[in-house]
Amino acid sequence: MTDRLTMQDPRAQYPQPPFPRQPQPVPGLAGKMDPQPDHGETSYKGSGKLTGRKALVTGGDSGIGRAAAIAFAREGADVAIAYLADEEADAKEVVVLIEAEGRTAVALPGDVTDEAWCRTLVEQTVAGLGGLDLLVINAGHQQNRQSIAEVTSDDFDRTMKTNLYAMHWIAQAAVPHLPAGASVITTASVQAYDPSAILLDYATTKAGIVAYTKALAKQLLEKGIRANVVAPGPFWTALQSSGGQPPEAVTKFGEESAYGRPGQPVEIAPVYVLLASQEGSFINGEVYGVTGGAGIA
Ligand code: NAD
Ligand code: MG
């Protein structure tokens, strides 16, 4: 593969479907995906945009969160990653990559559907990094259900707790620690604007994340803190192969995009870096789509 920054046709830059059938239990592991996603492990090059910053990335073990965590460390930040205990294998790889940059890594295994853990993980970040000024709330749960009749209360509850309640608990615990200049970034989805029939509960939470973040941005700017949303389109992550999509849909994932392929996590990392860094100083309360041309309006 040519260097990712070499000028080239972006449609042909990364793997295209068909992909092998690869169902996994929840939570899925990036390490079990075929082809392996590009989270920037060897391809992301930093340039000191986040020197000395202290970041927490939830869901930083894999997928979009891993790409953000790697990019932040390459840009000079110390990084704490939160993830589920079952994802230790993925998380260990990220810790090694952060430490390889000479930065501090903090590993925070635990379940964010537990309010007490959400508050504890923020405190452990502050203790481990000596503060907190970049907060990426990115952990998410997605489960496909063909019909409204199949969305049980437990299903609905899990999606709401992971995607909405945890966001609120973590943000609420973090805000008192954030200094002027800090940045909060949430991960919504194109699903907030163009929901799939099979993602009733998930799409609802993603629209909620957009509204919450825009409201929070208004509050936080009074303290000199910015908050923004990233809205990804289809990205090649374990979220999809672990029940986010039906297994057959994963073999064709990204096919319907104008690119004919899904995005790779490293392709969204620069947006997290921009929103995190002081270069994004006039960007607040915005939603950044990275959808491969699907648009978010
Ligand atoms: P991913 O599975 O790699 O990351 C999601 C992470 O969420 C997991 O790694 C896990 O650590 C964390 N998580 C889930 N439930 C948790 C819980 N109860 N406690 C603690 N952590 C928990 O997949 P991803 O696609 O990188 O997902 C990251 C974000 O991107 C999610 O918010 C997802 O909704 C969003 N997103 C993904 C896509 C896509 O196509 N992949 C598209 C739009 C939005
Ligand atoms: Mg994971």
Image (cartoon, rainbow, N blue to C red):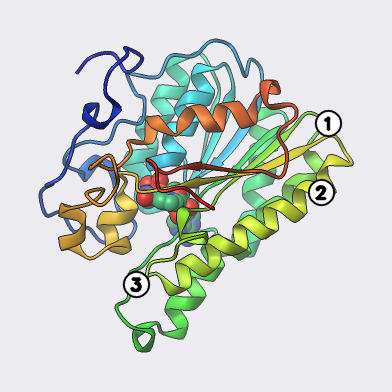
Amino acid type, mark 1: Ala
Q: Position of residue 151 (x, y in %)?
A: 39, 82
Q: Residue at x 30, y 53 (%)?
A: 28
Amino acid type, mark 3: Ile
Foreground mark, 1 or 3, reads 3
Residue in the foreground of this view, choosing between 178 and 274: 274
Q: CA distance from mark 2 to mark 1?
A: 14 Å
Q: Earlier in the sequence, mark 2 or mark 3?
A: 3
The N terminus lies in quadrant: top left
Q: CA distance from mark 1 to mark 3?
A: 41 Å
Q: Is residue 142 left or right of residue 262?
A: right
Which of the 4 image quadrants contains residue 272?
top right
Seen in the picture, residue 71 relative to 59 is either above or below; the reply is: above
Q: Secondary structure at mark 3?
A: loop
Amino acid type, mark 2: Lys
Residue tagged 2: 218
Q: Earlier in the sequence, mark 2 or mark 1?
A: 1
Seen in the picture, residue 202 relative to 290 is either above or below; the reply is: below
Quick check: can you spot residue 83? no
Q: Residue at x 35, y 53 (%)?
A: 86
Q: CA distance from mark 2 to mark 3?
A: 33 Å
Number of the label disc, if any, that sits on residue 180: 1
Q: Secondary structure at mark 2?
A: helix
Residue in the foreground of this view, choosing between 183 and 131: 183
Foreground mark, 2 or 1, reads 2
Q: Earlier in the sequence, mark 1 or mark 3?
A: 1
Which of the 4 image quadrants contains residue 145?
bottom left
